[in-house]
Image (cartoon, rainbow, N blue to C red):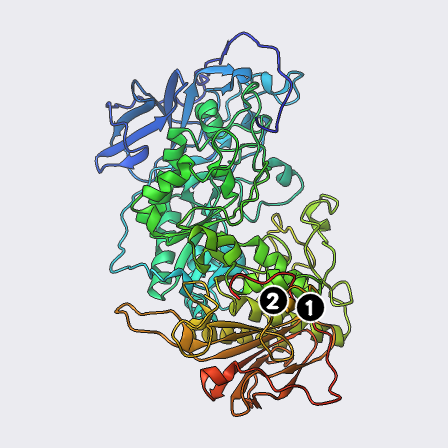
Amino acid sequence: MPTLTLPKQPTKPARKSARIEPPAASAKPLKSLPSWRGHAYPLGATWCGDGVNFAIFSEHATGVELCLFDRLGEPETARVRFNDRANHVWHAFVPGLKPGQLYGYRVDGPFEPTRGHRFNPNKVLLDPYAKAIAGRVDWSDEMFGYTIGHAEADLSFDARDNAPRVPKSIVVDSTFSWGTDLRPNRPLHETVVYEVHVKGFSKRWEAVPQELRGTYAGLASPPAIAYFKQLGVTAIELLPVHHYITSKHLIDRGLIDYWGYNTMGFFAPESAYSSAGDMGAQVQEFKAMVKTLHAAGLEVILDVVYNHTAEGSHLGPTLSFRGVDNASYYRLVGDNPRYYMDYTGTGNTLNVPHPRVLQLVMDSLRYWINEMHVDGFRFDLAPALARELHEVSRLSSFFDAIQQDPTISQVKLIAEPWDVGEGGYQVGNFPELWAEWNGKYRDTVRSYWKGDAGRMGDLAYRLCGSSDLYGWAGKTPTASINFVTSHDGFTLQDLVSFNDKHNEANGEGNQDGDNHNHSWNCGHEGREAPPEVWQLRRRMQRNFFATLLLSQGVPMIRGGDEYGATQQGNNNAYCQDNEISWLSWQRDEPAQRLTAFMARLIQFRLAHPIFRQPHFFKGHDLRGIGMKDLTWINADGNEMTDEAWAAGFAKVIGLLLCGDALELRGFKGEPITDGTFLLFLNAHHEDVEIGIPGHANVRWRLLLDTAEETGWVENEAMLAGGASHKLRARSLAVLEQQAGTADEAREVRVRRVAGESRPPIDVPLKKPATA
């Protein structure tokens, strides 16, 4: 049974909603327009050249009226009552209408909140299938289907007309010259994701024309394309671009829903990010952005929010779905349907198991693929979509529908694998086709570099693609979207600058946001810190980037981390549409060095298949060359033993990766090889003398040392097998084999000479399955 159990309300007699009054004598009379029967498919408003076909689903409605508007902020000028219905789809064709036409719906039916029905024809509603939306909500009391302040709260009925105060749906022209546009179709194991906000990316960038800053056009402007190419990222993941509504409680506090996770239009691109206006041109501008990014070889992934809508709880406004058919579109409490099941923390949950709501989600996904040419989706709170009666199910209708769909199943599908309901943490449990934001990767890597003990076994799994989470289901490392930071939480610089969140600007008394960040301020809270603290912070940022980009799986970088963006310690900047969230383009020398370091790391990763394998390491000699594809090395330079893994206290670990032992083949079956690399990670607060493995004639070139300000070692120091090397405190080093055979590279290291001290060495609690 659901965890939410609320008291039963007394059953009230059915209350028919009051019909809206005809226009006053002083108002313009409504136009009389001809209408034909039209078709029940496709849903939404479809321009046919000689008019527009309208179709809207509502199972429980008793009547539907189409309202046409000449301008925003004014009452409708015409109404068309639908007389035809097929399979609960109301439809009509209005000849002569053209793209750019503003419209909405009035839907009649029972107003019985205790039975889940909240029809109110006095409220103009957005089309659930609107392809574009114009205008903003004017947050007056008329926006609610009940009377604000009434003793019966949402059981009361508000008969006032809201028509001038609501956004309007727009009829769009779907034609666009895509030319030779082709999706890059880059394999996941060759993908590097860059997560960014459309507005925040270019709002402050003087290199972008002022009128394009903060827009779709700005994101695809020549400076932006050049920057993405300079970084070397391959996919741009956009925070929500579906049209959203800023909630009244934020407006009342003078804030904006900046992130956009308050969706009100699953087909409509957010108009605030359009430089060309909100009367339908936002659709063309979005398509032009995608086309330009594709031409540069960049994929576009959308962060999508199908788990809830902006209408909130039973005390929320009536904007669209609630007034179209509340009992169909939302998950209601079974024994008290006045209330909503809330698996999302927003007040409502979309009723995806309902066939028509599932159709809405699938139609929306196909629309963004076929019409807007996007390359994939990241699903916010994805378990909420896979709940059938209550529990999250791998056999849900949502997963089944996507699995069999020949269009949706072929793009990148990424889950945020948790919601706020019971059993909502589902990392590692999504079915095939799906990649997941790997929250365990984030937490483990943060804890390790923070210096927490007992993290070595988990770290070994995370570095190698998390086979403990994904290997059991026959999946590959590409199921793991690895990240250290994202839009939700600290920036990378704040992660190493603050022990505690500082969200006072959000106006919630610093009560919002996560309290468990696994962050470490390097000994000084805040940005005002001594030079030696900032030196350590820069090293820690390099450690995180190097770990992320040298791990198996798919790396995701939070936009702005590449230069050290800060939100002043705010780890929940969802409502900060200002310089707290916008990227800065005035970057000092340390910021430029960090950007160059990360860009070179991406280049290095993409150049070496050993760091982006499509399969898990096997941990044994695959080609009879005398060397495993992966060998775990301790600080002595010797292979880890079972006893060493079981010791349970360590902060130094090494990986020996053999490029000749890879089980990789090209399209034609040709074997793919790479160099042999040695990685050492030291989260200890002191320098550690490590042993370099291999025979004495083996030579290793030191490529990367995060203790250096540039990160990359320009003099390419050579180290011999059997030698010692000082691995500095809290640093990561990468070496590449230059001489000697593969078998010689993993030879047991020469024993330490008499009197040589053994540094404190910790080892994992458990032996990874890949060892």
Q: Nearer the viewer, mark 2 or mark 1?
A: 2
User: In which quadrant will I find the N terminus?
Assistant: top right
- Which numbered marker is on residue 347? none
What residue lies at 67% left-to-right and 16% top-to-bottom? 151
Residue positioned most to the top: 13
Q: In the image shown, does 60 or 190 lie closer to the viewer?
A: 190
Q: Is residue 58 visible?
A: yes
Residue 473 x %, y %: 44, 50
Residue pictured at 32% horizontal, 59% vertical: 183
Which residue extends farthest bottom?
A: 697
Location of residue 753 in the rendering, given as x and y in whole percent from the top left corner:
69, 90
According to the picture, the residue beneath numbered tag 1 turns out to be 650
In the displayed structure, would residue 85 be above or below residue 757?
above
Q: Earlier in the sequence, mark 2 or mark 1?
A: 2
Amino acid type at mark 1: Ala
Who is closer to the viewer here, 178 or 463? 463
The quadrant where residue 560 appears: bottom right
Disc 2 is placed on an element classified as helix
Coordinates of residue 296 in the picture (x, y in percent): 36, 66
The disc placed on residue 642 is 2
